[in-house]
Image: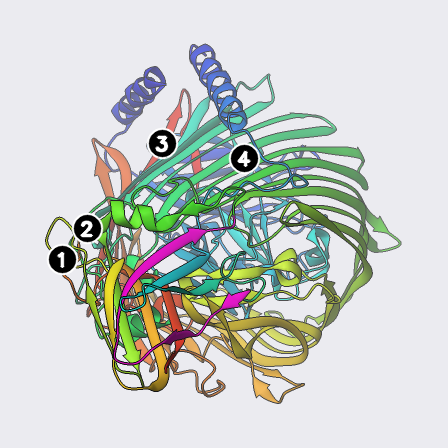
Amino acid sequence: MKKNIAFITALCLNVSLFSQDSGCTYSVKGQVIDSSHTEPLELAQIEVLDHKNRRSSTDKNGMFELKNLCTGMLELHVSHQHCEHLDFHLLLTRDTFIVIYLKHVEQEFEGFRVVGQSRLPRFHTITAKRLENMKANSVTGLMQELSGVTQLSTGPNIAKPVVNGLHSNRVIIVNNGIRQEGQNWGLEHAPEIDPFLVQEIEFLKGAEALRYGADGIGGVIHVKPASIFSENSGRISGQFNALGSSNGRAGTISGFAGNRISAKIPFYWRLQGTIQRTGNIRAPDYFLTNTGKKEQNYSVHAGYRIKRLKTELFYSRFDNTTGIFLGSHVGSLQDLQAAINSERPLVSSGFSYKIGRPFQDVSHHLMKLKNEISLNARNNLEMTVSYQKNHRQEYDLLRSASSFSGPSFDYYLNTYGGELIWIRNDFHKLNFKAGVSANHQANAYTGRYFVPGFYQDGGAAFFMASRQAGKIRYEGALRYDLKHLRAYLWNNNSLHVADRRFNAATYLLMVSWQAYKHSKFTVSHASSWRPPAPNELYSNGLHQGLASIEVGDASMRPERSFNQSVAYLFNSKTSYFEGEVFYKYLDGFINLVPSLTPQLTIRGAFPVFRYEQVDAGMYGLNFIFKKTVYRYFFVSAKGNLVFADDLSAGTPLSQIPPLSGSSGAGFTRNGYSIHLFGQFAARQNRYVENSDYKTPPPAYAVFGMESTVPLSIARHPARLHIIINNLSNTRYRDYLNRFRYFTDEQGFNLTLRLVVPLDITIKSIKNYEN
Amino acid sequence: MKIKTPLQCGIIALVTSLFAGACKDKEPSPNEPPKNETELITTMVIEFEDSFLFKKTYAVFRDKDGEGGAPPSQFDTIRLTSNRPYITKIILLDESKQSTDTISNQVLKEANDHLFIFTPAGVDINVKPEDKDDNNLPIGLFTVWRTGAPASGTMNIRLKHQPGVKDGTAGPGDTDVEINFPCVIE
């Protein structure tokens, strides 16, 4: 591979040599093509942002021309009545020709997409542009930009999304069109996705949400990489990232590169990889012993497309080793009490990159083959098969130096999936998708018992439809699932096979009303369900990290939710607002309830938590707001409030995020930007007395900054991001961090991120996806 | 497009290596009995030798499936005679495996990392360790217990694992065993 990199560099220099200083005499010509039908698009709008009169629209051959442009980085906006808008940057150093593929929206069921106003930010989506500035975060950190999403963490390196108070088995994460299948039941199991692979994150709110499963009771979050078919021939485009953080002395290198082999051969490829090392994280007053992390990920993406067929092969591998804060590992309740009562962690250390026990070692492979066949203008077929392998090893502290040094838990989860969808557009003014999907899952383990080995088979049929009638849009979806679980429960070499079958329907109805040009209301009602997960049915063991014994209940029935929500959405050139109020009723909500009698073990008495089904009610609101106040100045705010109750007992549910939010203000111009922000969380006052080791922590507010500076390295354009978190090095604890019992949150952290777009062309300069 | 060939080579090499990597583990199957090589401490036996009568008595805590699962199958009360010295030995076992493992031998071998703590409550028992590690700090596998007046209460026995931090006190390290035996002095 070294050879290639050398080649890339050489070409970069060549490109730079062509560039000339100043002079606004250059032109950008090009063609806009509908990506699904590969036909030229007439009347597409191309606009250079910040140059008010530089705009053009395409002729009947899809051709356009922008004249009298200056050298430098241009931000282009492409829109078409029936297509997704596209924003991208273009480094202009000479006259340039580009081909732009736009994606048709009519095939999509993302209901809030406004046809005809497509240049405005899309709802429920973290756009590529926003994500591009945030890539110093974990994938869960990125998801927090969505309205209603917060995080549940276990120390500084492990976090998973919480959607309106629900998480784990109740939130579906879709990774590049494939439902992510990790050991997602565990609170300390983070989604195994490389944040640098992500180009866009979307919260699926409409009918499309039912495509990936019935159990997205909290929500469905789709994490998407860039489309492989956005690569172009005659150039290799990509990006190189280098990051360094002061806290944890972390270093990350990440990059990707891809192209279309040639104009004649429609074969596309992209390679991507990330390497990261982090040492012990520092809270304001002390280091957190053994909180280093090692991560290496890569992915290979290939595509082939001929007139009626699009084939895509994707493989990604995620590998990480995460140290678990040593002070959280307790042998008995007495140790736990001592750790909790101590102001500072009982175990202290300096800085080190060394990761010792306890730690987690997780690898995740995801492989996907997708074929899209366009039968005719109105009928499309999509066939997807996938394979995922999740291997998770947890290493507890050794009891003695001569103990077995392998993993204490070692899980292997293999998932095979297949999906076939028929997409029909414009059928009596109705667009619909009908499909079937099937999956097979095998879970096996060695080591300590926590969840049994099992086989799980599932089959589902679904139908999703939408119809636009004037200003009103209707969307609906219906899904029926069959699931079969066989769990193998061993007791001293005697086997009991638990056989459970579940089947039920899921539905969703949504109406949206485009009240005015920029604003709309939506009302939705949905009911979904999930069968109890193997851990909820059969777990019976000690949770080392929390010194508690969790006991499942094999007789539990599925949990069903009834969700209703009303949303108000507004997007104009200068303002963006998304606000939602919701009420969920959960019948048979599976809840971990403290049991009154502790269990006696050789390490003392441990509190026992049992899975029980209760009726639960949850309501709340969330919003996101952004506005350009004056020319280049903008303000932003986000807020999140959830109330959740066990209706059977009349008590609040535990582990529900308190009132939280963020707000910020900034300035952006010509590629320079600065954004100051504050995040706050109130104290969670809704909890049951004496049900937790420690009462919820007090309210806090922390501040940070994000800034972007355009640079030129060897006359090659680049960007520097400067990100500061916990600017004032404030000591605080977060209610949804499971290590709040033991330590403060991370202190001051300065991250520098250098981004160098790779854009190597023979004849013209390529846009890079921003 | 000179670049084509090396790149394709690269892709092929990558794809091949990752599939090779994916297959190297020998995976367990869901329906076979799971291997568990992690040891447990399931059982504590305390042997008391009455130094007047040379008679041995035992107190046992036994929980064969470890923490969680079934409750302990045996949990004895320590019964001792008043005003008498007892030569006391602690034996720790792992009875969860096919062949029972004597964990206390490991404790002895790694004496520098281990310490037993004895905390009586409601009874008057003086516990004096009779064994020392390389650093001349007590271990507690062999002790002499001197009982006081008749009473009933509890005797808390803890085994602390203190690798590199053992200083003879209960503070450092984490707990491997903690049993609060009911205790009667007659």
Do marks 4 and 3 both belong to one polypeptide chain? yes
Q: Residue B76: say if magenta.
A: yes
Rounded to the nearest whole Å, what is the CA distance between mark 3 and mark 2?
Answer: 58 Å
Helix, strand or loop at label 3? It is: strand
Helix, strand or loop at label 2? It is: helix
Q: Nearer the viewer, mark 4 or mark 2?
A: 2
Helix, strand or loop at label 1? It is: loop
Q: Residues within 10 Å of mark 4 (few under 14, many from 20)?
A: some
Q: Which mark is residue B112?
A: 2
- The answer to whether residue A127 shows anywhere in this view is yes
Taking depth in this image into account, of A492 and A310 the one nearest to the observer is A492
Rounded to the nearest whole Å, what is the CA distance between mark 4 and mark 3?
Answer: 15 Å
Query: Residue beneath label 1, please?
Result: B137
- The answer to whether residue A195 shows anywhere in this view is no
Residue type (three-letter) at the residue carrying disc 2: Asn
| Coordinates of residue A755 in the picture (x, y in percent) | 31, 41
Rounded to the nearest whole Å, what is the CA distance between mark 4 and mark 1?
Answer: 70 Å
Residue type (three-letter) at the residue carrying disc 1: Leu
Q: Is residue A137 above or below residue A677?
A: above
Q: Residue A258: say if magenta.
A: no
| Coordinates of residue A88 in the picture (x, y in percent) | 45, 44
Q: Are marks 2 and 1 in contact (CB under 8 Å)?
A: yes
Residue type (three-letter) at the residue carrying disc 4: Ser
**Residue A284 placement, left or right of A674:** left
| Coordinates of residue B37 in the picture (x, y in percent) | 47, 41
Helix, strand or loop at label 4? It is: helix
Query: Residue beneath label 3, please?
Result: A758
